[in-house]
Amino acid sequence: MDKIDDLRMGDRAEAVQVRSSQAGQAADLSNYFSKAFSLHNEHPGGAVLQFAIACLRSVNIDPANWPMFQKLLLLCVIPEPACLPSVLEQIIVRRNAGAGPIAEQMEEIANDLIQITQALSIRAK
């Protein structure tokens, strides 16, 4: 896996293909995010995770996979804080469609971001 385009599972970035069965989709999403995090580590200055999240906009998530998917989205925010708007967009759109939020993890990620930002601010001074 040498390039960001390796995240594409379909013909276009907007058309990531994941299986429709609950178990198959869970495996596909897990593998997809593993690739995304690996590529993020290989390209630390790039917006790899933002790209990965954008590629999932049109994917229908099985309700049984929603908690896992939401956690994977939220995990993108810590190494790449610029992902937060895209992550929130995904969560809000899916929440409006009837999916439940995982408030505890959202609060934890927000607190982590605040602590990281404060630490970086202190170091910059």
Image: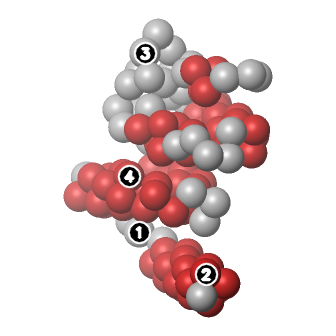
Q: Are marks 1 and 2 in contact (CB under 8 Å)?
A: no
What amino acid does circle 1 point to? Pro
First in residue order: circle 1 vs circle 2: 1
**Relative to 61, is 87 above or below?**
below
For disc 4, the neighbor class at 10 Å (few under 14, some 14 to 19, many from 20) is: some
Of residues 3 and 31, the one drawn nearer to the viewer in this rendering: 3
Q: Which mark is residue 12?
A: 3
Which residue does the image show at 58% across and 41% down from the upper left? 46
Q: Nearer the viewer, mark 3 or mark 1?
A: 3
Left or right? Give the position of 92 relative to 71: left
Which residue is labeled 1 in the image? 101
Q: Nearer the viewer, mark 1 or mark 4?
A: 4
* Location of residue 60 in the rendering, given as x and y in whole percent from the top left corner: 39, 36
Which residue does the image show at 36% across and 58% down from the upper left? 85
Left or right? Give the position of 34 relative to 70: right
What amino acid does circle 2 point to? Ala
Q: Are marks 3 and 2 in contact (CB under 8 Å)?
A: no
Q: Nearer the viewer, mark 1 or mark 2?
A: 2
Which residue is labeled 4 in the image? 86
Which residue does the image show at 41% across and 38% down from the upper left? 54
Q: What coloring was used for the rendering?
A: secondary structure
CA separation, marks 1 and 2? 35 Å
Residue 15: in sight, yes or no?
yes
First in residue order: circle 3 vs circle 4: 3
* Location of residue 59 in the rendering, given as x and y in whole percent from the top left corner: 41, 33
Helix, strand or loop at label 2? It is helix
What amino acid does circle 3 point to? Arg
What amino acid does circle 4 point to? Ser
Q: Are marks 3 and 4 in contact (CB under 8 Å)?
A: no
* Location of residue 24 in the rendering, given as x and y in whole percent from the top left corner: 64, 31
Which residue is labeled 2 in the image? 124
